[in-house]
Amino acid sequence: MGWGDLGVFGEPSKETPNLDQMASEGMLFLDFYTANPLCSPSRAALLTGRLPVRNGFYTTNGHARNAYTPQDIVGGIPDSELLLPELLKKAGYINKIIGKWHLGHRPQFHPLKHGFDEWFGSPNCHFGPFDNQALPNIPVYRDWEMIGRYYEDFKIDLKTGEANLTQIYLQEALDFISKQQTSQQPFFLYWAIDATHAPVYASKYFLGTSQRGLYGDAVREIDDSIGKILKHLQKLGISENTFVFFTSDNGAALISAPKQGGSNGRFLCGKQTTFEGGMREPAIAWWPGHIPAGGVSHQLGNVMDLFTTSLSLAGLQPPSDRQIDGIDLLPAILQGKLIDRPIFYYRGNEMMAVRVGLYKAHYWTWSNSWEEYSKGIDFCPGQNVSGVTTHTQEEHTTLPLLFHLGRDPGEKYPLSFASDEYQRAMEQISVVVQQHKVTMVPGEPQLNVCDKAVMNWSPPGCEKLGKCLKPPKSDPKKCFWPH
Amino acid sequence: MGWGDLGVFGEPSKETPNLDQMASEGMLFLDFYTANPLCSPSRAALLTGRLPVRNGFYTTNGHARNAYTPQDIVGGIPDSELLLPELLKKAGYINKIIGKWHLGHRPQFHPLKHGFDEWFGSPNCHFGPFDNQALPNIPVYRDWEMIGRYYEDFKIDLKTGEANLTQIYLQEALDFISKQQTSQQPFFLYWAIDATHAPVYASKYFLGTSQRGLYGDAVREIDDSIGKILKHLQKLGISENTFVFFTSDNGAALISAPKQGGSNGRFLCGKQTTFEGGMREPAIAWWPGHIPAGGVSHQLGNVMDLFTTSLSLAGLQPPSDRQIDGIDLLPAILQGKLIDRPIFYYRGNEMMAVRVGLYKAHYWTWSNSWEEYSKGIDFCPGQNVSGVTTHTQEEHTTLPLLFHLGRDPGEKYPLSFASDEYQRAMEQISVVVQQHKVTMVPGEPQLNVCDKAVMNWSPPGCEKLGKCLKPPKSDPKKCFWPH
């Protein structure tokens, strides 16, 4: 989902009454970011509080390439990483993930091996249908075992866009919350729904209800579900004891537009890019009785902060044996403070850009290659900022392209290199970047090797269902990451 | 000002708390339009309830050219047109205009000859400073006579952007409202401020206060002033008896960006164009006790509707001897009804596009000429939709370019001509367009002839001030309208 997909962020159809109300009852973050313009690395960063380049969710197969965890990926979340649920356990939390995991699907990467107590959902994107010959269909797990596969047991109708998945995920969430409330145990619920990810889907009741087409139907269903979750918390009388945060893992994928694509508002480009449209996210914090209603924050925030903030809420300290990039947002959320911190925009192994205050400096620019672009793959449709949305990887490390995001949120007008403003801003930014680079210890890259043999042929539990498939011979190769 | 300049419409700095509150207390219009992508014709349409091509505010000097009323224009609002204040007088209203008139500056076009009882402001834009030799500075009027000139008696500091004008206009508004309340007379106030029009200005108190630079300072001052006007109405106890509407006369002028340019959100292009960015406007109706708080309307609205709606509020009928394009919005505002009506997008003498429901058909496309564009004049900076933002006037009258503004508010993806959806939509639209064209009787074009002799050399009242200037010899010529 993108920044511009919510009514409260100016989506012209204004079809997210529940999220808009969540904002009016809580705090809206206007300057909140994801850690990466792509799904897997962002999710790994959210759960570890660390940049993907540290936790291993990146590739060195090419320079500045986006990589994720398709089902032939060999890597996944390393055991050495400490995930939020692992830490929350120490404070007695029960942890559940509902929806897409995406941190590796091989046995050692299973979410229940990394702190979660329960899981309902899938390890990969709901791509398909596959023929179970060249590619297996993606499994859906309940806890340790698969209980079916997409397109087989969990239908997605690509023609009509109908799928009941969000309703299933909603019911899972409501049931989990009720159960925890009954047992009086503190809980962490990671509700990782994916209806707005292509192939976009919605359930029958929502199909055709949006002005925005199928994508809008999916947004409406998510919005409605969030309303139901919040009301459920209120009904159970635990809303004042439950911190809820809504955000997204990357900007809207404009490549799927207009039929399946969302909106990044007036920000430049979308998913896959380190322009604002790829990484600025809708974000709302909700905690009645604690967060003042109708608050708006300009705090620079990041999904990694949810790691540190959640630990803080549970009375825990973040690990001290490693670099944590997330900060505790509670002073911003509860006291309206503004904490000075930079935002780093990575693409794979490269720091493409950095934001300090209202300034954003691009050290590298790239949308995608001419080769891809000429085939119609366009991450910036209808947008073209000369020298900025470049189709070759352009290095600006000696003289970064600098934008003032207040005057120019759309990154259209680089500041003059000769201006005093440029000099002053870059002096400040250079120090931040230097410090960041000097102390950077990259993790072992997890997204380099792909092998068809590791795909979801025979997930645990497949025997009971008669759904085990025979894997091909192992043939590990460098994964191909075109952009 | 543009659609995207308000926090409530997703401006990322969210610096319009008063307008946002006005929306939360009143009704927000998401699909509201101006009658023209340029100032003078829009204002003429607002006050007459008629399209510029009917009321004469257009040119036939070239095809599809934007024209307005610079100070060498010979034409202005014809006596035959009935303006809103003229009609409101019949219901006992006192009418005042504060700010920019822009319907002609020669004596016969004076606002007090067209229904207004009071005026404080100027007939033209606050361009300058001029040397009073080749060009006179623009006069500021109080009622019938000038009381000074811009840059002489009413300072605008182009270096700092400082000018006190919005504060003066605010005080005028507050005083007028107080006076009418004392005399218990119904009033119409047309508060036509212009701080966001280049050269953009703000008063000392607001300078440097916005994240968005000078343009944002101007927006903040306008926002603050509107808050003060609404509070004044409440303090006087007449807010439940006063209908207030906020809107703009064209999209943000992206050509002045980033230093003096605003935002049209995710809409395509800006002022001067018939894309959504040129004509979709922020719009809020406020009338405590009558309009349900927090309402949002998808009613297709137009500034011309304010003519008919205002008459309706005053218990008056619109004139029956002429075509009125504005409709009475009260059923939409008070009862939440949706009235089926088209929106026509004109550029000069040409109907460029039409919106029916969520579909918008472009019969002509043009941003501006290659000649202008090559000089850096760009109405769509950073945006380029192939075959849509064309630099030659492209005719599509036999096969209009069709967009679905729900799925594609940015006008990036024309529907396939071969699709069923295209056929179905165009069948409906064609009928609307045919009916519109058959019954169209264009007015006498007022914006064809320019003459330096008619400029503001010696406005009434200049003698008292010793500010009369000698006009050059009359030399009427066709005005030059490049785009």
Image (cartoon, coloured by chain):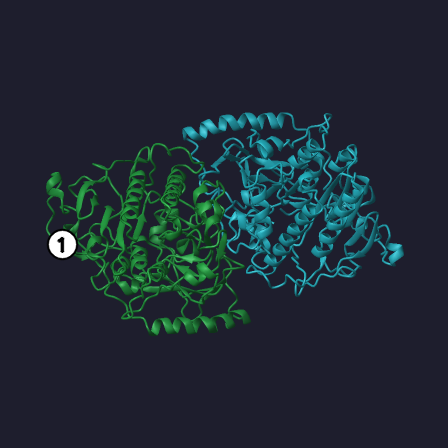
Chain colours: A cyan, B green
Q: A423 or A223, which is in the foreground? A: A223
Q: Chain of mark 1?
A: B
Instruction: Give percent across and percent down for residue A365.
Output: 54, 40
Instruction: Give percent across and percent down for residue B314.
Output: 33, 60
Mark 1 is surrounded, within 10 Å at the Cα level, by few (under 14), some (14 to 19) or many (20 or more) other residues, namely few
Q: Report which residue position mark 1 lands on.
A: B475
Look at label 1 and name its amino acid. Asp
Give me the residue at 55% from left, 25% from top.
A431
> In this rendering, is residue B395 above or below A73?
below
Q: Would residue A384 be found to the left or right of residue A242 on screen?
A: left
Q: Would residue A395 be found to the left or right of residue B444 on screen?
A: right
Determine which quarter of the picture holds residue A342. Answer: top right
Q: Hey, which residue is sitting farthest right in the picture?
A: A464
The total of numbered circles placed on residues is 1
Q: A42 or A378, which is in the foreground? A: A42
Give me the residue at 21% from left, 64% from top.
B80
Helix, strand or loop under label 1 = loop
Give me the residue at 37% from left, 59% from top.
B392
Instruction: Mark yes or no: residue A110 visible.
Output: no
Instruction: Give percent across and percent down for residue B104.
Output: 22, 54
